[in-house]
Amino acid sequence: MTARSLCAPFAEGLRAGEIRYQACRACNAPQTLARYACRACGAADLEWRAARGTGRVYAVTTVARAPSDEYRALAPYTLAIVELDEGPRLMGHAAPGARIGDRVRAGFFWFGERQLLRFAAEE
Amino acid sequence: MRQAFVAGAGNTSFGRHEGRGALDLMAEAAQQALEDAELARADIDGVLCGYATTLPHLMLSTLFCERFSLAPAYAHSVQLGGATGGAMLMLARELVRSGRCSNVLVVAGENRATGQTRDNSIQTLAQVGDADFEVPNGASVPAYYALLASRYMHETGLTEADLAEFAVLMRANAARHPQAHLREPIRREDVLASKTICAPLKLLDCCPISDGAMALVVSASPRGDARVAIAGAGQAHRHQHLTAIADTTNYGAKDSAQRAFAEARLQPADIDYLAIYDSFTITLAILIEELGFAARGRSAERVRAGEFSPDGPLPLNTHGGLLSFGHSGVAGGMGHAVEAFRQLAGRAGSRQIASRRKAFVHADGGVLSSHVSLVLTREGEGPG
């Protein structure tokens, strides 16, 4: 059996319409991005958990100049970093006009071969 | 331990060098640095070079050495994004202080503007983002810095008009340097009216993509009348990716600077020249504030008061910085140190400012990810 890459559970989660994040089995600290060891206590004992998909906008931009033809079709688009209620931060697309501090809920959209996140105001 | 001195500097002009490759540009800057240091090729026993996105070679340092006819006892390249130049100078200092080398050539350059398409360059750089969590969203380096800016401005009250002040100052400085990429004067209104790249960053908040090269020689003894020592150095690496930034009051610059100041036995208040990395206006504002050269959210007030101008108390990037002298990758990030050396050594020609003794140099790589700080001091009497 081929080994899975560190980030595979996150990518597989997106395809399944679920946000997955790592948390430390030793101290319970949530992790932003993917790691081999806990950023808080250093334990090399992390597990993947499912997030509810709700959080608060931490940072936001509107991209007018897309980096390539692939993304130019989307421009202008809003990108945000959202702090999930479980603690990790995550980058995704966001509804136009999203502001720092807004409560948001994650949605998903297909872009090429990938499913990406789009955060919108929480109902 | 021995001291390490900056013995000489060289550079090409920045802008477009149609038809010239990375090695061509590096050779021009290196030749000039050797002449400035009054050293022969045989005197160079260490070579450090950066990387070139247009020439991704496994052994760029020794490729350069063969073409440039050097046979050093120590050589390799260094990769630390925009902080590469600072890291090379720090390492060159260690090599000299330890006695491993006597004269280390530090060189970088590339044809980043004419050697590839703009999209290629932007995509190569975007890969400093996280390949699974960030890049697939259509993010780019301007997008990372725009996100960073949105949060920092939210917390500190810094405004787009504040950021524009830095663009205007860098352009005014570049206008005095005949080799700068962008020399046409701009006003604050021009910056604010320039087209949005990634809000809140507009075109004139972003550095250009340039061709060019820079070189410095670090030696065990000063050369000629230039007695400029590297008195302290420090680094800090607290995150790689924007999303993982934990503390907006210490991206790492503060830690890096404290290490450099401690080693130099100096304080920020002793500094009389600033050489600060400025990939975007927000980069410059954040670094100046985190380094303690302005209160949080208040750096633009010091620009408006003329305090960072060439005739002010704390001149900043008198060559025009990345924002206007230009950004040619590793060489762009070396430009600040090259100019600091020239100002301290009295070799800045028509840009020469009043006598300066202590310069603080700071570079960052990635998204405020890797930090390198250097303290340069002019020893002895030296030029007026």
Image (spheres, coloured by chain):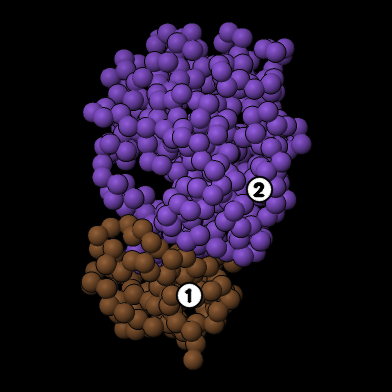
Q: Residue at x 31, y 69 (%)?
A: A74
Q: Is residue B87 above or below residue A63?
A: above
Q: Amino acid at mark 1?
A: Gly
| Image coordinates for residue B261, horizontal then vertical, percent | 70, 36
Residue lying at 55% horizontally and 79% vertically, measured from the top left: A102
**Residue at 43% from the left image edge and 75% from the top image edge:** A96
Judged from the image, the secondary structure of the residue bearing numbered disc 1 is loop
Q: Which label is found at residue B369?
A: none
| Residue A71 location (% of width, % of height) | 29, 64
Q: Determine crowd level at label 2: few under 14, some 14-19, many 20+ residues with C-alpha closer than 10 A.
A: many
- What color was chain B assigned in the picture? purple
> Which residue occupies 68% across, 28% down?
B311
The quarter holding residue B79 reads top left
In which chain is the residue bearing label 1? A
Q: Which residue is disc 1 drawn over?
A: A97
The chain in brown: A
Closest to the observer: B296 or B74? B296
- State whether discs 2 and 1 lie on one chain: no
The quadrant of the rendering that contains the N terminus of chain A is: bottom left
Chain of the residue on which disc 2 is drawn: B
Name the amino acid, label 2: Ala
Q: How far across and how far down the image is residue A110, in percent?
A: 27, 77
Q: Position of residue B377 (x, y in %)?
A: 67, 24
Name the secondary structure under disc 2. helix
Q: Report the residue marked by disc 2.
A: B300
The residue nearer to you, when weighing B367 against B158, is B158
Q: Are marks 2 and 1 in contact (CB under 8 Å)?
A: no
Give the side of residue B11 with respect to residue B234, left or right. Answer: left
